[in-house]
Image (cartoon, rainbow, N blue to C red):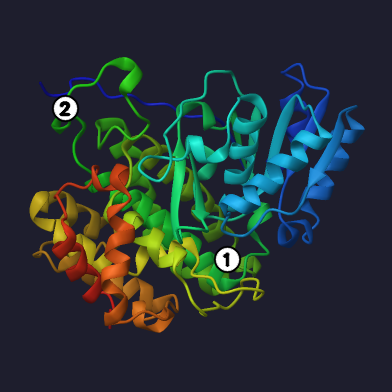
Amino acid sequence: MRETVFTYAAPALKFGSGASAEIAFDLSQYAVRRVLLVTDAGVAATGHPARIAEQLSAAGLEVTTYDRVHVEPTDASIEEAVAAARDTGPFDAIVAVGGGSSIDTAKAVNLLTTNDGELSEYLNAPVGEGRVPTRPLLPLVAVPTTTGTGSEATAICVLDVLSLRVKTGISHTRLRPTLAVVDPDLTTTQPAMVTAAAGMDVLCHALESYTARWYSDFDAKSPEQRVPYCGANPIADLWSEKALAMLSGALRIAVRDGAQDSGRPAREQMAMAATFAGLGFGNAGVHLPHANAYPIAGRVRDFRPEGYPDAEPLVPHGMAVSLTAPAAFGFTFEAAPDRHLRAAALLDPTVTTGDGGTLPDVLRTLMRDIGFPSGLAEVGYGEADVDDLVDGTLQQTRLLATAPREAGADDLAGIFRGSMENW
């Protein structure tokens, strides 16, 4: 029997210049006295977290700041954050200020300070046990400072499992933030490559949710078995289409002029597109590019992108996602040609028709324009790594199930090989 029901959920949303100055008022709507503010050292250096903490303190709230979030969180970094929260808590609410790393870390802290069990038990199967939280979580206010992850709108936390050298996540509706406060003014300090990588993450969120397997093509599930990723559906489509249309005009400008006043409208468009895409993929799901990205990021050797902390090798999430996107969407084209062509036209209004190469070509042109690496080879991978990358992708069963076309090991190997050089 096929599924006849799709679900949709979203946090409360506050968007606009100066919105981050109103968080004290927002928290006054709850019985809140003690607040944990979660951020990372780079974002802390901008002064935004300190300003927000001061405003909360001025409103009579007791604020504890944790500023040791790891860029691209790991199981070890999250366990450190959880331990710190347990030592300094209990808290009545959590405020996350930063990119997806800070927001995802805050989600995990919220989960593990309100529910029993260890981090590994909640990780998605087959990496973890897929345990479900049984107790309510604290109010979580997510304040993004990057225009990319959409984590402020989703019920997903992503992290690296160091011992396995692979990314995985926790996915449950209770992880979704209570309120997303999107203030474009907080994104002005993003370096160009951070803007580029985060923007490509937004783009892939929208593309993958728009081309995901249709919700009624899944087998029927009971209410308790339904997961946040329910497949493409009419409501998620609206958010994804709007996000793609916004990206069409804003991404190149935001990368080029984001630090200047002339780039302000583009920054605002990117901030809104990130949230819109999050509202789409946070319900429909993502598929092959994200599944491929997890081993790409988890097995990095010595690549260090411009604009990111250089203390350790890193393939930023948005970069890892998009490097295989052209080949992945070439592979999925036959499952939904109209959707792939529609997505290409939204990204490039000059596109009116085409074949399976249209969307991949649009993506390659955009990636080249914003200064991305030309392919997996440029971030340190080669033919000898393909089997290992395929093995890592095959562990992402939740994401692979959302793909509109089934991808086996040989298919994935072809996608990785085809992504070594995109131009």
Pointer 2 local density, CA inside 10 Å: few below 14, some 14–19, many at least 20: few
Where residue 388 sits: x, y (%)? Answer: 31, 68
Furthest toward the front, the residue is 163
The amino acid type of the residue labelled 2 equals Asp
Quarter of the image where one finds residue 351: bottom left
What residue would you read off at disc 2?
219
Vertical side of 97 occupied by 131: above or below: above
Front: mark 2 or 1: 2
What residue would you read off at disc 1?
263
Q: Secondary structure at mark 2?
A: loop
Vertical side of 121 occupied by 296: above or below: below
- Which of the two residues, 164 or 88, is positioned nearer the viewer here? 164
Q: Secondary structure at mark 1?
A: helix
- Which of the two residues, 181 or 75, is positioned nearer the viewer here? 75
The amino acid type of the residue labelled 1 equals Gly
Q: As drawn, is 409 to the left or to the right of 385?
A: left
Instruction: Locate the N terminus and report the quarter of the image it occupies.
Output: top left
Query: What residue sits 77% from the left and 60% below the top?
Result: 46
Q: As drawn, is 112 to the left or to the right of 41?
A: left
Q: As drawn, is 207 to the left or to the right of 109?
A: left
Query: What residue sits 21% from the left and 63% below the top?
Result: 412
Where residue 303 sits: x, y (%)? Answer: 51, 79
